[in-house]
């Protein structure tokens, strides 16, 4: 089975660990438990093929900054999460994606996720703001309710599709003909802020 590695990034408390436990175990925990660093696997059907997804969770704790960087390097794709109830988390995500881009040579496959859609009465980030950021990143965007597992499988499926789409573009760019010309045509498909 094809293996794909992805990393869930975002500010503390936005719902990263919840998204992962909902995907892999269909469990919602009301209590907030700060994450150390975690890893899970999940078989995912993407179109006509199965993929074994390895998902790395991350924590915002500064002590784990080194671990986080290692995961950024390992990750083929990134679920970039903020909470629609926190403008702070939306801003922080931009900073995180800047750091991520600095560590990666190629285009980074990303799916942007606004979590806690059920808490609309506490909303601080509009759907338009999320859509605007996704436009700048040139990546898929979804607002989800991780509490009810809504769209949780969907965002990971979209991420695998993004990884496959972007990696097939990189292959095209590095064909012998392109290399011989010395000027591989790089299609920019996901600009990180
Ligand atoms: N209402 C609501 N709460 C959520 C949702 N996702 C996560 N939470 C809660 O938000 C808190 C932080 O979630 P967690 O997954 O630990 O965040 P992390 O720090 O990003 O891993 C926990 O109390 C969760 O129960 C959601 O979609 N809706
Ligand atoms: Mg966590």
Image: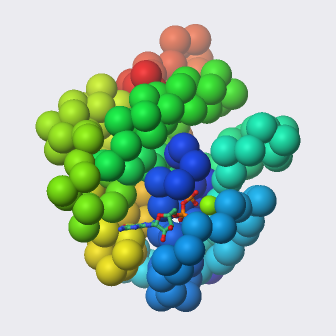
36 shown above or below 170: below
The foreground one among 189 and 112 is 112
- The quadrant of the rendering that contains the N terminus is bottom right
- The answer to whether residue 100 is above or below residue 25 is above
Question: Which residue is at a point 70% across and 61% down the rendered structure image?
Answer: 35
The foreground one among 89 and 158 is 89
Q: Residue furthest left?
A: 128
**Residue 32 seen in the figure:** yes
Left or right relative to 161: residue 55: right
* Colouring mode (rainbow / by chain / secondary structure / one colour): rainbow
**Relative vertical location of residue 150 with respect to residue 76 in this rendering, above or below:** below
Look at 48% across and 88% down and name the residue there. 26
Q: Quadrant location of the C terminus?
A: top left
Query: Which residue occupies the foreground of this view, 137 or 15?
Result: 15
Residue 160 can be seen in this image: no
Q: Residue 101 sits in which quadrant? A: top right
Say whether residue 15 is left or right of residue 105. left
Q: Quadrant of ligand 2?
A: bottom right
| x and y percentages locating residue 116 in the rendered image | 33, 61
Q: Quadrant of residue 139?
A: top left
Q: Position of residue 51 (x, y in %)?
A: 54, 75
From the top left corner, tell me how far across and down residue 54 is, in percent: 65, 68
Vertical position of residue 192 compared to residue 48: above or below: above
Left-right relation of 32 to 120:
right
């Amino acid at each position: 089975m094809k293996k794909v590695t992805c990393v869930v990034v975002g500010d503390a408390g936005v719902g990263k660990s919840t998204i992962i436990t909902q995907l892999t175990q269909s469990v919602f925990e009301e209590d907030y438990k700060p994450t150390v660093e975690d890893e899970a696997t999940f078989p995912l059907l993407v179109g006509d093929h199965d993929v074994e997804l390895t998902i790395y969770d991350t924590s915002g704790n500064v002590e784990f900054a080194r671990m986080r960087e290692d995961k950024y390097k390992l990750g083929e794709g990134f679920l970039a999460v903020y909470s629609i109830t926190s403008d702070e988390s939306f801003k922080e995500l931009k900073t995180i994606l800047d750091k991520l881009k600095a560590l990666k040579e190629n285009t980074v496959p990303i799916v942007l996720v606004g979590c806690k859609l059920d808490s609309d009465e506490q909303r601080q980030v509009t759907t338009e703001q999320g859509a605007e950021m996704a436009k700048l990143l040139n990546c898929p965007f979804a607002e989800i309710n991780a509490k009810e597992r809504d769209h949780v499988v969907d965002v990971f499926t979209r991420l695998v599709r993004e990884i496959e789409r972007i990696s097939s573009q990189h292959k095209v760019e590095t064909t012998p003909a392109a290399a011989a010309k010395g000027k591989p045509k790089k299609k920019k498909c996901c600009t990180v802020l």
